[in-house]
Image (tube, helix red, strand yellow):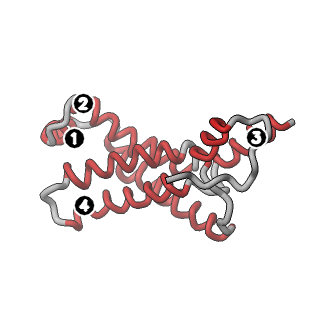
Amino acid sequence: MPLARSATPAPAHESSATTSLRALLAGPVAGVSRSADVGRVILRVVAGLSLAFAHGIGKIPPSDQFVGMVAGMGLPAPGLLAWLAALTEFGGGVLLALGLLTRLAALLITVSMLVAAVLAHAGDPYSTREPSVLYMAIALLYLFAGPGRYSLDAALFRRARDALSS
């Protein structure tokens, strides 16, 4: 699926690889209303901070119980993966809230929440898996749609584009 182009054209001297990287990281802006972007900000901040502070921060450092749960899923290097999951929930949540490296954060959150929903809570009722599924759905939104115009990604790429064009 091709990524939508940014509303601002790339400078003539910018390579197509740079343009593609900018579109991948900063996300499309064209065709999205300002009110829709305000909605994106609200969802991004609430979901990101909730993930970071309600779920992630308590897992740093991973407890023996959390490492044991990861080991019980049959995954290799449970200590390392427990740290990655904890850092993804906390750091990825903060990055999502800030709109910084949004698509990378969204990808990591998606993978972590998929593992939580499918492996960690496999035998649990849906009501137990629901938070993982909801965070995954929100992360998928930002993975595909990008962070929007009111994000640090958009501001940084706008600044970099302006510096290159002057």
**Mark 2 closeness class: few <14, some 14–19, many ≥20 residues within 10 Å:** some
User: Which residue matches tag 1?
Assistant: 66
**What quarter of the picture does the C terminus occupy?**
top right
**Which of marks 2 and 1 precedes in the sequence?**
1
Residue 15 in which image quadrant? top right
User: Which residue matches tag 3?
Assistant: 161
Residue 129 numbered tag: 4
Which of label 1 and label 2 is nearer to you? 2
Q: Report helix, strand or loop for mark 2.
A: helix
**Which of marks 3 and 2 precedes in the sequence?**
2
Q: Report helix, strand or loop for mark 4.
A: helix
Residue 147 in which image quadrant? bottom right
Residue at left offset 63%, top offset 64%: 37
Say left or right for 71 vs 27.
left
Residue 161, x across and y down, in percent: 76, 40
Gap in angstroms between the C-alphas marked 4 and 3: 42 Å
Gap in angstroms between the C-alphas marked 4 and 1: 17 Å
**Which of marks 4 and 2 precedes in the sequence?**
2
